[in-house]
Amino acid sequence: MDTFEELGSCGIFCANCGNYKKNENCQGCRNETELLEDCPTRICAINKGILFCGQCADFPCSILSDFYFDGKPSHKQAYQNMLEINEIGAAAWLLRQQEEQVDKE
């Protein structure tokens, strides 16, 4: 995966994404042509030509509010992730996630 490919458009780190876990050959939400469960944030980000929702002038929008607060813990965490990404930058956030993933292994 490329530099930002482990960052889902919604703010989920790939290793924590349900689609990624179900599809061991997943290439990230921007590269896959069809996900097992498509995500409205993915579709919107692709249509707007942005890498992740935090780059959008409308962040956070109604699509994200519905997604982030739908009761799924990983989606709620994605909102916190996106706030952190906007604060420290995507590269620093990804590095932190990758280091945490190594620590879990």
Image: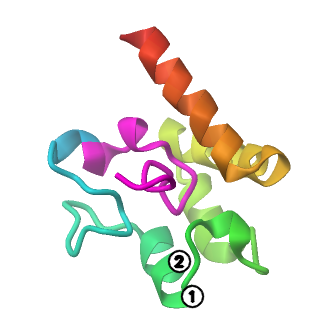
Q: Residue at x 52, y 63 (%)?
A: 9
Tag 1: amino acid: Lys
**Residue 41: x percent and y percent?**
50, 70
**Residue 93: x percent and y percent?**
66, 40
Tag 2: amino acid: Ala
**Residue 46: x percent and y percent?**
46, 81
Q: Secondary structure at mark 1?
A: helix
User: Magenta residues, as a range?
Assistant: 1-20
Judged left or right of residue 55, residue 34 is: left
Q: Residue at x 18, y 43 (%)?
A: 22
Q: Residue at x 60, y 54 (%)?
A: 68
**Observer-nearest of 71 and 27:** 27
Find out whether the residues at labels 1 and 2 contact each other: C-beta distance under 8 Å: yes
Judged left or right of residue 28, residue 24 is: left
Packing grade of label 2 (10 A; few <14, some 14-19, many >=20) is: many
Name the residue carrying label 2.
Answer: 45
Alpha carbons under labels 1 and 2: distance apart: 5 Å
Q: Residue at x 50, y 39 (%)?
A: 74
Name the residue carrying label 1.
Answer: 48
